[in-house]
Amino acid sequence: MAGGGDVPRPRAQAAARRGGRNKERNKTASSLPLDVVAAIAARSDPATLVRCAATCRGARRRVADDGPGFRLRLRHADRFVPSLLRGHLVEVCEHIGVYKVRMLDITAPPMMSSRPLTAAEGFPPLTPDGKAAWDHMLVASRDGLLLVRTTDSRDLPWHRGELRVCDPATGRSRTLPAEPTFPGAAQPFWEPYVLTVGDGDDGGGIRHFQVLKTNLVMSDPNPYLETQAFSSEDGSWGRYTTIRTPYLHCCRCLLRRARPLVAGGAAHWLCVTESRIFVLKIQMRAAQAAVRVTMLPKSFPRPDAVIGTHYLLATSVAAGEELAVLVADSEKISCWVQTKPTGKWELRPQVVMHEYHEVMLWLRSRRSLGSFRAQLHWFAERSGLVLFSSDGYGDFWLDHRSMEIVRWFPDAPVLHGVTRLPYEDLSSWVPTFTSS
């Protein structure tokens, strides 16, 4: 044909059309901005992150970037993978009146090394003028954020300092306004602060959070709970409220530490008194706050001053709502679970440390160690791990789901009278991608 080339045949025309559509589709797919891909991954579970990172080389570089400006924070990861728990935080008194927060890192040589949190992680050692040291005391941890009490070493001894929420993964922090003072008498073993974390951020890179301050007043003829909450979105403390607590007229003081546990949108405390043991529950975001008290059965183990009974409130599964109480006395740990819908407490099989029995006998023969007495320290709500220790034997990680010891740290330092908290944060995980 004059003025033209060869005329394509019908099959060739169809192939050309398919090729054009494929090119257009590929062009559309490759035009998705990497920041959008990264934003999708940051709001997804770990498996989705890996699949997203495998889409192209550029996305892999963006996801694996360890720079603080690009580090991703994985959200909606309700089931934290225990193998990603690198260690835990401990508050150490370096000398009289000076407290520092250290990370016991199981990934660094030797097996369990201790290092202080740095200024890049939101814990500067000195004040901005460089003339005084900061003291940091652990208060609470949840979903990668830490609530600490920070004081200036120049402050007067009775100065309580200020509350600060830190994100070690990004180094960002936010100082709370002056906290309210409650009129009720404080319980020495009551841990008053509950930290919860949201998904959004305040524009400065730190996620939305809420700090609930509480105080259980048991000395009053009609016991009550004092509460007041700070919201990072509002930037201020809310209204002060008092809530009557039923069935506590005969309870006057706590005998063991009452540490809060967040489960099912509510905060729970296990309270051990001279006459009763009960769980106190308060809904975190209810329009009309109410306190519920659940008494444990009379068959529940009572505290023993001789063998040093230890208690720890947990959930039966990681990130679950069914409550459980671990009780450690001498060489065994028992587990009591509150079943639904009856609410009754049932005893589950005791943990038997048969895996390390021979090793413990060997240690006793070499180090002249005494009896094995487990001390319960914390329950990691996302991973379901429990940290307990025994003087001279080291630290242990117990998987609450399988009731088996999954890690043993025989060389862990012996620490008395210090605060220990888990650090569950997926943003510290930098994935490694290899070509296959």
Image: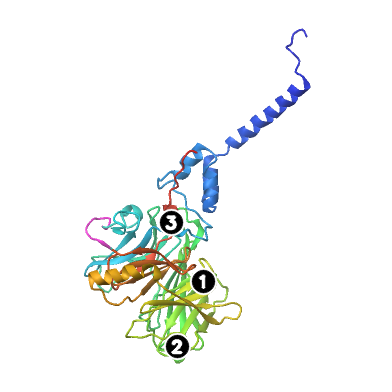
* Vertical placement of residue 328 versus 25, above or below: below
| Residue at x 43% of width, y 43% of height | 65
In percent of the image, x 52 and y 66: which residue is there? 319
At numbered mark 2, what does the secondary structure look like: helix, strand or loop? loop
Q: Earlier in the sequence, mark 1 or mark 3?
A: 3
Q: CA distance from mark 2 to mark 3?
A: 38 Å
Q: Return the x and y of residue 297 as percentages of the image width and height.
A: 50, 86
> Which residue type carries mark 3?
Leu
Determine contact: label 1, label 2, CB under 8 Å.
Answer: no
Look at the image and say whether residue 96 sits in the magenta stretch.
Answer: no
Instruction: Give the image quarter of residue 420.
Output: bottom left
The residue singled out by tag 3 in the image is 84
Magenta stretch, main secondary structure, is: loop
**Res. 276 mark:** 2
Task: Reply yes or no: does residue 132 show up in magenta.
Answer: yes
Label 3 crowd (10 A; few <14 / some 14-19 / many >=20): few
Find residue 316 and name its label. Answer: 1
Label 2, residues with CA under 10 Å away: few <14, some 14-19, many ≥20: some
* Part of the protein shown in magenta: 126-134
Residue 376, percent from left and from top: 38, 73
- Disc 2 residue type (three-letter): Arg
Residue 392 visible to an observer of this rendering? no
Counting from the top left corner in percent of width and height, residue 171 is at 37, 53
Label 1 sits on what residue type?
Ser
* Residue 350 x/y as whole percent: 45, 76
